[in-house]
Image: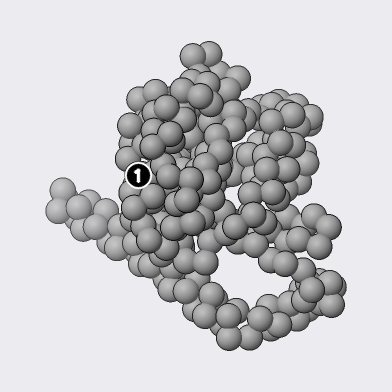
Amino acid sequence: MEATWCGKIAKSLVIFGSGIALSACAYAAFRYWKRRDPKSIDEGFEDVSKLEESPEKRIIVLGLESAGKSTVLAQVTSGTNKNEDVKPTEGFNVTCLHSGNISLNIWEIGGSESVRKYWSNFLQDTDLLVFVVDASDLHSLPLAVKEVKTLLGDDRLTGVPILVLANKQDRPGAMSPEEVADALDVGSIPSSKHKVKVLGTQTHPNSQARHPSIAEVERVLLVMSGNN
Ligand SMILES: Nc1nc2c(ncn2[C@@H]2O[C@H](COP(=O)(O)OP(=O)(O)O)[C@@H](O)[C@H]2O)c(=O)[nH]1
Ligand SMILES: [Mg+2]
């Protein structure tokens, strides 16, 4: 009986792992295809002439599971609270933010342990890395710090600016953005290697209003992704 269960669990893990690996492969193929023929993704998508002259930027959003990546992004891109619609991210999510003639393609990659090992497959050609931290979860902070250090050691991110969101500032005992910056040892990162900014953020769980920190994230995304 136990062996059957183990077999089922092992089978599920293999299927899930294959799904993520396939996503990563599909993503790599997408990047290759897009570089080969930049116009083809615009066809039937929107106002083609507008997109062709638009500078497109690619933003990767990482962070541990439940840090608030999807919730913050839903509010940044839609301007409304969509908490009821936010489901745990399996694999990755892509959203787009248009502002003036700039298009930000925002890739949120899941933060569970099984997905984190695929993060490195998504780092190529990144204009801005956003790392979301649950500032109220002191228990998970060392793991978040470890993941950021691993990312900083990846050559594909050299020169890429980093925006850290110290999220859930509304929660009692949440660390301030300055405390999160200290925990990440931001001061020791050479500015020639990465421009780093840490912002405190929070979402209003039961309200249609955007917290001012979300408007600030939108502004900083545009500034930082265009400045490298
Ligand atoms: N109190 C509070 N809860 C938040 C905040 N941001 C997200 N959450 C909640 O945290 C949980 C995980 O959010 P989610 O966006 O799915 O995290 P993700 O796994 O990083 O994408 C959800 O229940 C959200 O409603 C915040 O600023 N404050
Ligand atoms: Mg998510």
Residue at 63 percent across and 86 percent down: it is 37
**81, 4: nearer the viewer:** 81
| Above or below: residue 21 compared with residue 175 | below
Quarter of image, res 189: top left
Residue tagged 1: 149
Residue at 38 percent across and 67 percent down: it is 21
- SS category of the residue bearing label 1: helix
Q: How is the image coloured?
A: one colour
State the image coordinates of residue 62 (x, y, percent, origin top left).
Answer: 48, 48
View extreme (top): residue: 172
**123, 227: nearer the viewer:** 227
State the image coordinates of residue 204 (x, y, percent, origin top left).
Answer: 69, 26
Residue 201 shows in the view: yes
State the image coordinates of residue 95 (x, y, percent, origin top left).
Answer: 66, 56
**11, 37: nearer the viewer:** 37
Residue at 38 percent across and 51 percent down: it is 151
Drawn side of residue 92 relative to residue 147, left or right: right
The amino acid marked with disc number 1 is Lys
Ligand 1 within 8 angstroms of badge 1 C-beta: no
Residue at 35 percent across and 44 percent down: it is 149
View extreme (bottom): residue: 36
